[in-house]
Image (cartoon, helix red, strand yellow):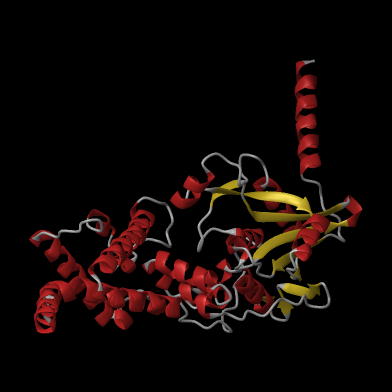
Amino acid sequence: MRHSLLCFFLLAAYSGFCQIIPVLSDSARISLITVAPGDETYSMFGHSALRVYDYRNRLDRCYNYGTFEFDQPNFLLKFCRGKLLYYLDIESYRGFEYGNLSDRRGMQEQLLHLDEAHKQRLFELLSVNAREDNRYYKYDFFYDNCSTRIRDIVQEAYFHEIDYDSTHLPMGTTMRQLLRPYMRPHPWTEFGIDLLLGLPADKRARPEDFMFLPDGMHEVFGHTMLAPGVQLVQAEHTIPDTPLAREAFEPDFFQHPFWVMCLVAVVGLLSMANPRTEHWFDTLFWFMLGLVGLVITLLWVATDHSATKNNLNVLWALPTHLLFFWRRNRSEFTQNYFIGTAILAAMTLLFWKWLPQEMPVAAIPLVVLVVIKGLWRHHWKVESWRDEFTGAWKRRTT
C-alpha cells in the first residue's frame, strides 16, 4: 500500500510537470521577434522576444525578458543604484503584436531552424526560466538584457555549438559607438548618456557584444550558419508587410546641445561685465556643475551599473564644486581651489581627443568656461583692473 501511494504521487508529479511543459508538436515553430525602436527612452534601442507557435497545442506566446514593474517599492532608487529587477514575462503573441503596432513600432520575425530535439530543449529552457524562482534577474545595460538573454538561451539550446558569424560586423567599433544611430533623434538624451557612461562604454565590442542590441542580434542571427548550407534563420518577414512611417526628426536650435552650451558660455562671459550678474551666474553655474559631478561620482562608486564606472567626465565636473559655489567672498584657499579646477579642466581639454574615453563634444563650451572662470579673475586680477578703470573714468568725467 505504501509503495502504491508513492508511485501515485510520483506519477502525479510527473503529470503536473508535463502539464507545465508540454511536448511540442512537429509543426511547432520558434522565432526571434525584433521590435523597432520607440520614442520613449527605455525603448529607443529596440526590443527582442522569442515567439513559440504551436497550433496543435494551442500555443502562441511571446517570451519577453525586458519587463519591469514601475510600481515596485523604491523603483527610482533601485533603478539609479542598478538593483532594479527585470523578469521574463509570458504574454500572448497577439497582445504583444498589438502593443507594438499601436506604438507604431514595426517588427521583424525570423523563424529559427530547429530540429525537434533542439526545439523542445529551447521550449523547456524558456519554461524553466519563466518559473517564479528563476524569472527575475538584475539588468545590465551591455551584458545582461532582453537581447543577451535570448542570445544565451538559444546558444544553450544548441549545447553552445553555434558559431555566430561576425564577418559582416564592423570590428573595432566601441560599445558607445554602437549606440550612436539610436540616439541621433534624441540629442539631449545622447548628451546625457555620454555624460554618464564611463570607460567601459569605450571598450571595443567583441562579436557577441554586438548582440546586446536587438538589431545587432537580428543581423548576426541572419548571417549565422549551423552547418554548410544550413542557416540559423530559416525564413524572415516583416510585421506589418508595409513599413510603418515615422516622423522625420528636424531639430531646431534648442535641440542642439552643443549650440545651447555655446550660448550658456557666451552668457557666462558677458556676465563678467557686471559684478552682481556675474555672482548670480557663477552661483548657478558652479552649483549645476557640482550636481552633475555628484551624479557621475555616485553612478561610479555607489551603484552596480558596470557601464558608468571610471567616468573621466568627473575631471571637469567636480562634485566638490558643491562646497564652494555659494561663497561670495573668496579666501586664498578658495581662489586656489578654482585655479586648480581651471588647470585640471584645461589639461582635460588639451588631451580631449586622446583620452581613452570618448568625451561629449557638447560639453566643450562648458569646459572652456570652467577654465576662464577659474583663472581669469584670479590670475589676471580682472576685478581690480575693472575697479581701477571705473575709478579713472569717474575722475575723468568729473
User: In the picture provided, is 385 more to the left or to the right than 272?
Assistant: left
Who's the residue at 64% across and 76% down the image? 219
Q: For this rendering, which residue is in front, 205 or 2?
A: 205
Residue 314: x and y, percent? 30, 65
Q: For this rendering, which residue is in front, 137 or 162?
A: 137
- The quarter of the rendered structure image containing the N terminus is top right
Residue that sits furthest to the front in the current view: 398
Q: For this rendering, which residue is in front, 145 or 377?
A: 377
- Please indicate, yes or no, whether residue 112 appears anywhere in the rendered image: no
Who's the residue at 70% across and 56% down the image? 122
Residue 359: x and y, percent? 37, 75
Residue 303: x and y, percent? 40, 51
Who's the residue at 13% across and 64% down the image? 335
Task: Give residue 133's quadrant in the image.
Answer: top right
User: In the picture provided, is 3 more to the left or to the right than 341?
Assistant: right
- Please indicate, yes or no, whether residue 136 appears anywhere in the rendered image: yes
Q: Is residue 241 above or below residue 157?
A: below
Number of marks in the rendered image = 0
Who's the residue at 41% across and 64% down the image? 196
Residue 164: x and y, percent? 60, 73
Q: Is residue 101 above or below residue 139?
A: below
Residue that sits furthest to the top in the current view: 1
Task: Give residue 210's quadrant in the image.
Answer: bottom right
- The quarter of the rendered structure image containing the C terminus is bottom left
Residue that sits furthest to the right in the current view: 56
User: In the picture provided, is 390 more to the left or to the right than 117?
Assistant: left
